Image: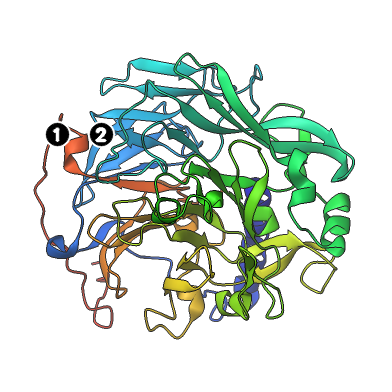
Amino acid sequence: MDQNRRDFIKGVAVTTIALAVTNPIKALAFPTVFPHGTTIYNPEKCYNGFTVFGTEVVDQGTVMVNMNGDVVKQWNTICQAEHPAKLLKGGYLAGTSRPAPDKKGRIWDDEHSTDLVVVDWDGNVVRKIPKAGMHHDYQFEGNPVGYHVPGMPVDNYKGKMLILSHKMVKNAAISDKDLYDDYIAEVDADGKIIWEWLASDHVEEMNFPESFRKAMYKHPTYSMTRTPGVKGGDWIHVNAASYLGPNKWYTEDPELYKMFHPENVIISNRQTNTSCIIDKKSGKIVWQIGPLYYADSKWVFNGKYYKRAYKRLGQIIGQHHTHMIPKGLPGEGNIMIYDNGGYAGYGPRNPGAHFGWSDARRDYSRVIEIDPRTLKIVWEHSAKTMGLRNKYQFYSDYVSSAQRLPNGNTFITNGAVGQFQEVTPDHEIVWEYISPYYTKKGNYNLVYRAYRVPYDYVPQLGKQTEKAVIPPDRKTFRIKAQG
């Protein structure tokens, strides 16, 4: 689906160029010249450390920068346009590795797929899951979400792992086309599968309306995969999978809040505008939001109807990185979502979606933190909350993520534009970085998901020099003429 989205954007770009020829003054809607690297940095207000991200540029791999944007480490062969890369305490890096340049598939146990590896600081492989075909997410035992949590560092690469991958399947209840289905496997320390889950087996539990099912049957996001010659319907497109982990709800009442069992798995399904919690024991979906968020959509939790819950929440479209904020972090127990906007979903055709595919559309993003019982928005970050008039000034129509930091700030990846921001609870941007890693084809600096880790994750480097970066006054900033 990401490739389809890039093709769509490319088409828009072609149209924009055509407009520029006929109307060069009005065609350019956004700046074309702007600084890269660290553009804002207030050391006193930040959770200082290293930032790790995959560049999506094949020969650049994964990069780690300090707060001033200096590259302090690079792994060129890890996550070569795959995602995400994760830094483990001790200077270890996890991500995909291509056994050969053409082995970039995302199908479980397929000969054309990537391996999932952990390498030490010198690049030596210390763990490998061959042909895992990992896409979009994986977790290590001892940490539910893959980012730093006090008391739960990401450091146990030898234990159990939760891996998100694909399988090619047929399911006539979804579509008559082959499906590029989402598959989750949990493996033990020896790489043996001890739990698995296939999305298509649970379609009847997903509460999709009839019109939704009809559109999905005809147009299940059918496209080429990364495996040579293989096409399939990326019908649900799971883009995040993590454990709930220890949480205050389950601790308070294990029976009332059994859907929040720490071992249960929460997933984000971009194409269906849904997020779900999977009961680990039964495999059944025990909590779900979406696909419709109408004012009259009913939200019932534990038998109680919360009137106007969906109306207040608002429509979620094409979201990424749905996860429960872990115990030990501000906001613990709430669910955080990068609500992209862009386009996704299925339903009746309309002028913006002639086939009913990706019928829900919106041209701005928001990061929301919600109470999983009531769907009440506890915190939201968007152009509106920053006091900006134009909502599209905070917008990444695909990829992207949000990480809660120990100091209460939120680290946000606006991935479509290669922008990372650390923002305070009251929406002040205290750190910003723009990726300078552009692809040769397509000329984009996409970053799927970046992570902030504390200095002690990297004993090889230690704490860095921290120098404030104060941006110039935009109104008076000028580029000098030549000569």
Q: Residue flagged by tag 2: what amino acid is it?
A: Lys
The colour scheme applied to this rendered structure is: rainbow
The answer to whether 195 is drawn above or below residue 392 in the figure is: above
In the drawing, what numbered circle is on residue 73? Answer: 2
In the picture, measured across the screen, residue 38 lies left or right of residue 347, that is left
Q: Do the residues labelled 2 and 1 touch (CB within 8 Å)?
A: yes
Q: Nearer the viewer, residue 51 or 410?
A: 410
The answer to whether 161 is drawn above or below residue 295 in the figure is: above
Q: Disc 2 to disc 1, how far (Cα)?
A: 9 Å
In the picture, measured across the screen, residue 167 lies left or right of residue 242, that is right
The answer to whether 40 is drawn above or below residue 456 in the figure is: below
> Which residue is under mark 1?
461
Residue 268 visible somewhere in the drawing: yes
- Mark 2 or 1: in front is 1
* Position in image of residue 287 (x %, y %): 62, 55
Residue 355 visible somewhere in the drawing: no
Q: Which of 123 and 201 is in front in this view?
A: 201
Q: Earlier in the sequence, mark 2 or mark 1?
A: 2
* Position in image of residue 126 (x %, y %): 36, 16
In the picture, measured across the screen, residue 243 lies left or right of residue 311, that is left
Q: Determine whether the residue tagged by mark 2 lies in a helix, strand or loop.
A: strand
Badge 1: residue crowd in 10 Å (few <14, some 14–19, many ≥20): few
Q: Which residue is drawn at 48% across and 47% down?
A: 448
Q: Residue flagged by tag 1: what amino acid is it?
A: Leu
In the drawing, what numbered circle is on residue 406? Answer: none
* Position in image of residue 209 (x %, y %): 82, 62
